[in-house]
Amino acid sequence: MPQNEENPHGFEDQLGAVLRRTGDTFAAGDRRALVDGALVRGRRRLVRRRLAVTGGALALAAVGLGGVYGGSLLDPAGATTTASVAAAPALGSSAAPGKRPPGENEIPVKDIADVLKAHSPKGTWEFGDLSGTGQSALGVFDDGKGKAAVSVGLYSAPGTGEGGKDQVTCPDKVLVPFDACSSRTLPNGDRLMVLQGYEYPDKREETKNWRAVLLTKDGFLVDASEYNAPAEKGASVTRKNPPLGPDQLKALVTTADWRPLLARLHTVPQKPGGHHGTDESTGTAVRDTLRLKLPQGLDVRSKGGSGSHGYLVVDDGKGASLVGIDVQPSSKSLISDLFGGSDVVTLSDGRKVRATRQPGEKGGAGVVWWNVDTITPDGFRVVVSAFNSGAQYQAATRAEPALTMDQLKAIALDPKWRKVSLK
């Protein structure tokens, strides 16, 4: 999707495209360039993963399998939040060069790499520069069956230990395709998720992404990711599956050898936010209100949501259609950037409305995306989207979404959303 005013994710999309093009320039025979390229892309990915971990409850579907769920799991609604578990797996440093996540100490990358190597199968490793500090390590592992990128990151969960529970909860398969996923509480009270998924939700490439995330009972995250290619993007698949099986991934993230390194992290207590209620309760209220606003004759096939996001997959007898909503109470800073174009309509009460029709952006064949983005003068934003498919990465099931553009506008402009956001 081209970068434009109605695409608040344009920068990230553009960055991803640049990174993919960069990956394509590596010759298969140039081992060092390939490893270094994977490290660079991995560090960028970890930055986004870290944002996902600290951001919120859902976000993942839009970006594939990377940060398991961070911001808008849907993202179809065009939200500008930075939350995704299945935000996609991360590789490399958890912070931009020279910057450290607020309130957290960094760890010698060599120490992280040493634990990673000690709890991996027999094989050879290639790493980039291990002399610095950070919160993660990325290497290219080869057990003789093909090179594969493998990484581990160490983080503090936001708030209390409960703040990271979305990172260890299996994603909704409506939004994120995967072959297998398990999520459970271990005997010692830690929580573990093991996910066998894909780098691309539409599976346009055969790159698999397997991931294990441990949330310790005292509030730390150990996040391991692996691929069946020497880089998450821009490298050809070298093997059928990533090198570590589910049990090996579990053993890697649950080893006690991480404890001394986790102890070096320190989190500054977070200031109380302006939220009323939990992400789960607010998300349920948003989703249930969306259900009440739908026109008659629609059967709900599935539903979900968290924080300010909600979605429903509906069917009027003509095929599945994904409908999503994003409610953002404090978005005044976005008015000039997102609502200054000639396609914006200003209503008598000062609310601004932009309606767009465009192709889907997650790879589903024939998918179209209808979107209504609204904001009040004081920055209360509501975005409603609909697709002609039950999932963005799946082929279209119908010619148009189940809701008309006028129906989407009516839902987005309903004044009840202000009450819902305070629940």
Image (cartoon, rainbow, N blue to C red):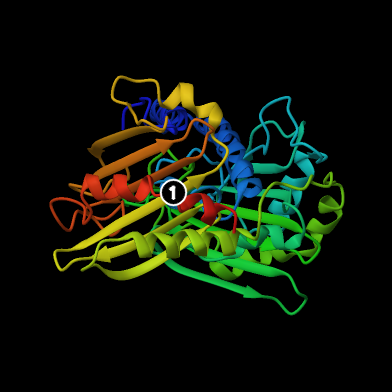
Q: Quadrant of residue 68?
A: bottom right
Label 1 belongs to which residue?
415
Residue lying at the far bottom in this picture: please name it.
Answer: 187
Q: Residue at the spot x=79%, y=46% of the render?
A: 270
Q: Residue at the spot x=50%, y=28% of the render?
A: 334
Closest to the observer: 124 or 115? 115
Above or below, comparing residue 412 to residue 101 in the picture: below
Residue 48 placement (x, y as % from top left): 57, 39
- Placement of the C terminus among the 4 image quadrants: bottom right
Above or below, comparing residue 193 to residue 337 in the picture: below
| Three-letter residue code for mark 1 | Pro
Q: Residue at the spot x=35%, y=25% of the render?
A: 4
Closest to the observer: 157 or 137? 157
Residue 213 placement (x, y as % from top left): 63, 60
Residue 84 visible somewhere in the drawing? yes
Residue 121 visible somewhere in the drawing? no
In the rendered structure, the answer to whether residue 289 lies left or right of residue 68 reads left
Closest to the observer: 330 or 152? 330
Q: Residue at the spot x=87%, y=52% of the render?
A: 263
Above or below, comparing residue 7 to residue 77 in the picture: above
In the rendered structure, the answer to whether residue 325 lies left or right of residue 106 reads left
Q: Quadrant of residue 1?
A: top left
